[in-house]
Amino acid sequence: MTFREIVSTVFLFLLYLTLQILLVRNLVLFDYAFCFIYIACILLLPNETSFSWLLLIAFTTGFVVDIFYNTPGMHAAATVLMAFCRPLVVRSQIDVPGMESRIEFSLNELGAGAFFRYVFILALIHHTALFFIEASSLTLLVPTLVRVGASTLFTTFSIVLIQFFTRN
């Protein structure tokens, strides 16, 4: 990565975290759909980021959100799980062998369908872990599944819309 790419990535990282903490935190639809755009910090990292750095960045991101949401470890655990599954999802989504290391995760590069699938799958993993940790039992299975589905769609559409309006 060049110095310019590193600065750009750090800036986007801080921007998504700031948006999550100050603005999107209060964006809830019908008490079921929550928006967690901070996961875009992990989703949009370059693919050449090493696995250990990816997990460390995911933990730091989740920990910062946990501090402001007063949820000890829930976001950190869900974000690390999502980052852990990211290489598997990338391998299953990229068609051309050998291109995985040079791909840029953006709406422009992947196209609308592939980018939507990529964000949707990883958001589903994140939200499933997060809401089942929050529920801490299977007694509230149906409401938890509704929250997972609604929040995954809400977050996915939000990230795709942000990418659509900020692409070059």
Image (cartoon, rainbow, N blue to C red):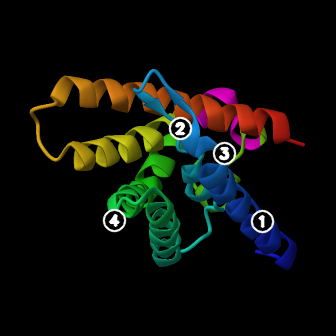
* Label 2: few (<14), some (14–19) or many (≥20) C-alpha neighbours in 10 Å: many
Q: Is residue 150 left or right of residue 23?
A: left
Front residue of this view, candidates 114 and 71: 71
Residue name at image x 24 percent, y 50 percent:
133
Element at badge 3? loop
Disc 1 designates what residue? Answer: 11
* Label 3: few (<14), some (14–19) or many (≥20) C-alpha neighbours in 10 Å: few
* Disc nearest the viewer among 3 and 4: 3
Q: Amino acid at mark 2?
A: Cys
Range of magenta residues: 109-116
Do tag 4 and tag 1 residues touch (Cβ < 8 Å)? no
Disc 3 designates what residue? Answer: 23
Residue 58 placement (x, y as % from top left): 49, 66
Count the labels in the image.
4
Q: CA distance from mark 3 to mark 1?
A: 17 Å
Q: Amino acid at mark 4?
A: Gly
